[in-house]
Image (cartoon, rainbow, N blue to C red):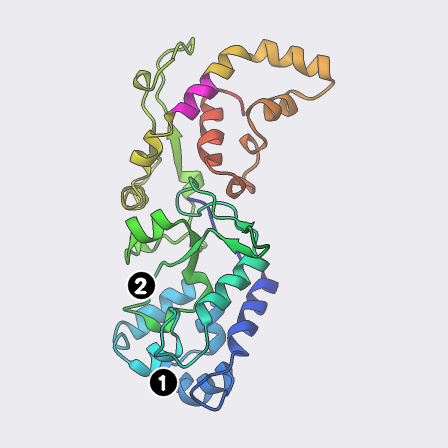
Amino acid sequence: MIKVTYQDSFKSSYYELIADSRLQKFERIKFEAYYENHLESKLGYSLWDILCGDYEKLLEIKTKLGTKYRKDTHIKGLFNFDKTKNVKISKLQPKIATFMQEELEIDTCYYCNIEFINKFKSSNGEYKNGFTLDHFIDKGNYPYLALSLYNLIPSCYTCNSKLKHSSEINNLSPSSSRFNFDFKVKFKTFMKNENLQIDNENDFELILKESFSNEYQDYIKIFDLNGRYEYHKYKVIEMIRKRRKYPDSRIKELAKLTEKTEEEVKQDLFGEYIFEDDILHKRPFSKLIRDISKELDLS
């Protein structure tokens, strides 16, 4: 639902994290050196392409190499992401999670925008996080992409473990340059009551409606977004009631009284993200609130 972007400096730091890690079973040789000596000629791609290539590069690699290495213990052992005993590199999954926790500002699930997955300080003073890192491209079938940055999507437990599983959803990863969910798919209520006399959840629909294509329908279905957001229709009712209380005439009065712009007053009343696209990941339900705000002629 929310696009994932990684800056060049972050990609470089991520590469160094993996490349400089030392292998336990091979006299602690660095990951990069081992890969270049033993696997680069076999896979045909540089370690940078594997670890930090963009999502489209990963699709190219996946198409070329296919699933022929899914049972290759050598490759699975080197690119192991999970915490298991049979690995050739030390504690990589927690190392990556900690790196993400420290270097990225992760607030809500990129798949659903329902759950907070942020970093928090525990009672013993240690920092922890609420996110899981989902492999958009299944690491079981494509083990050589298990550590690829653009294959790791910060997500909530529900999206990752209960709903998505190993689905690749038409290659529509939030880390893809062509991922455009926010623009193409909007929350709609299809309210027919122009006076906004809507007081309970049975008075309106709430569905995600895609314009001019159906490419995101599997995404909506797999993450059960319509069903999950149905439970939160109360948020829309709150917005409708507030909009009844603050029509345009009242907003103009408040703007004049407080010496603020009408946009600032609307942000005070309905939230700052009703106008901003690049902060949708900051709060749960921000896309819902922004889309419904447009339907209520607030933005």
Question: x, y percentage for residue 13?
Answer: 58, 68
| Placement of the C terminus among the 4 image quadrants | top right
Examine the rendering and report whether any part of residue 178 can be seen: no
User: Dot 2 lies on which element?
Assistant: loop
Give amino acid for label 2.
Asp
Residue 261 image point, x, y percent: 68, 22
Nearer-the-camera pick, 44 or 288: 288
Q: Earlier in the sequence, mark 2 or mark 1?
A: 1
Residue 107 magenta: no
- Crowdedness of circle 2 by 10 Å Cα count: few (<14), some, many (20+)? some
Task: Decide if residue 19 is on the left or right side of residue 195.
Answer: right
Q: Nearer the viewer, residue 157 or 1?
A: 157
Extreme residue toward the right, this view: 259
Query: Are circles 2 and 1 on residues that touch, CB within 8 Å?
Result: no
Number of numbered tags placed on the structure image: 2
Residue shown at 27% from the left, 74% from the top: 70
Q: Residues within 10 Å of mark 1 (few under 14, many from 20)?
A: few
Camera-nearest label, 2 or 1: 2
Does the magenta stretch mainly form a helix, a strand or a loop?
A: helix
Secondary element at tag 1: helix
Where does the N terminus fall, quadrant-wise? top left
Q: Is residue 257 left or right of residue 20?
A: right
- Nearest the eye: 20 or 64: 20
Q: Residue at x 34, y 79 (%)?
A: 86
Residue 12, position as x, y percentages in the image? 58, 69
Q: Can you identify the residue that label 2 sits on?
A: 138
Image height check: is 21 above or below 207? below
Indicate whether residue 239 is drawn in magenta: yes
Task: Tell me if residue 17 can be seen.
Answer: yes
| Stretch in magenta | 234-240
Amino acid found under the numbered disc labelled 1:
Lys
Residue 42 tag number: 1
